[in-house]
Amino acid sequence: MIIFDLACQHDHQFEGWFQSREDFDSQLASGLISCPHCGSLDIRRVPSTVHLGRSGTQADPPRRESPVVVPAVDGRAGALQAFRHMTELLLANCEDVGADFAEEARRIHYVEAPERSIRGVATAEEYAELLDEGIEVFRVQRVKPGDLH
């Protein structure tokens, strides 16, 4: 089962549960998915809420109250500074699960493990499979603390 966050052209947001990504695509093309708020058939997938927080023992980790501030980018030096800042945030706020990334991402997605931000290593095949299952992940060059200095 895959859960997608969806929205209509009026930005009413809701979620849909599907057997596979292909099942979603087929139902969407056939006009079988409609907005439960207004009935619109103009539906699109929207990004799931991303949680950047330290893992802990709480059942529901606290959400970040304010947006992450990224420094303004001014030329090459500014871009490198922004990349360093973003990388430091990811390193500080995501649990490193190493080579178990794909398995742990699935466990979190299917609510078999506590929701938290994770990072780790996945093969190109594992990455593609996660996307096919509707698990929103993104790739970043592998960096470790100290690599950016």
Image: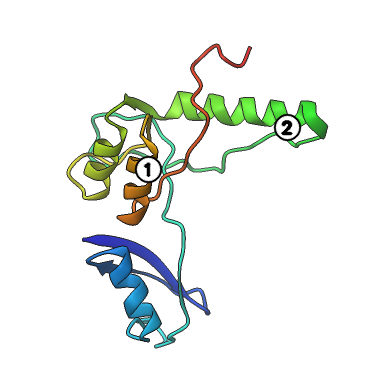
Q: Is residue 31 visible?
A: yes
Q: Residue 65, percent across and down?
A: 49, 43
Q: Are marks 1 and 2 in contact (CB under 8 Å)?
A: no
In the rendered structure, the answer to whether residue 2 lies left or right of residue 72 reads: left
Q: Which residue, as the protein is rendered here, is positioned at the far left?
A: 112
> What color scheme is it?
rainbow
Q: Is residue 134 visible?
A: no
User: What residue lies at 31% left-to-right and 33% top-to-bottom?
Assistant: 101
Residue under numbered circle 2:
79
In the image, is residue 32 above or below residue 86? below
Q: Residue 11, percent across and down?
A: 51, 73
> Helix or strand or loop: what does disc 1 sit on?
helix
Count of numbered labels shown in the rendering: 2
Nearest to viewer (mark 1 / mark 2): 1
Which amino acid, mark 1? Tyr
In the image, is residue 144 above or below residue 23? above
In the rendered structure, the answer to whether residue 29 lies left or right of residue 79 reads: left
User: What residue lies at 52% left-to-right and 79% top-to-bottom?
Assistant: 10
Residue 2, picture quadrant: bottom left
Residue 37, picture quadrant: bottom left
Residue under numbered circle 1:
127
Question: 1 or 10: which is nearer to us?
Answer: 1
Q: Residues within 10 Å of mark 2 (few under 14, many from 20)?
A: some
Disc number for residue 101 = none
Q: Which residue, as the protein is rendered here, is positioned at the far front?
A: 125
Quadrant of the frame with the N terminus = bottom left
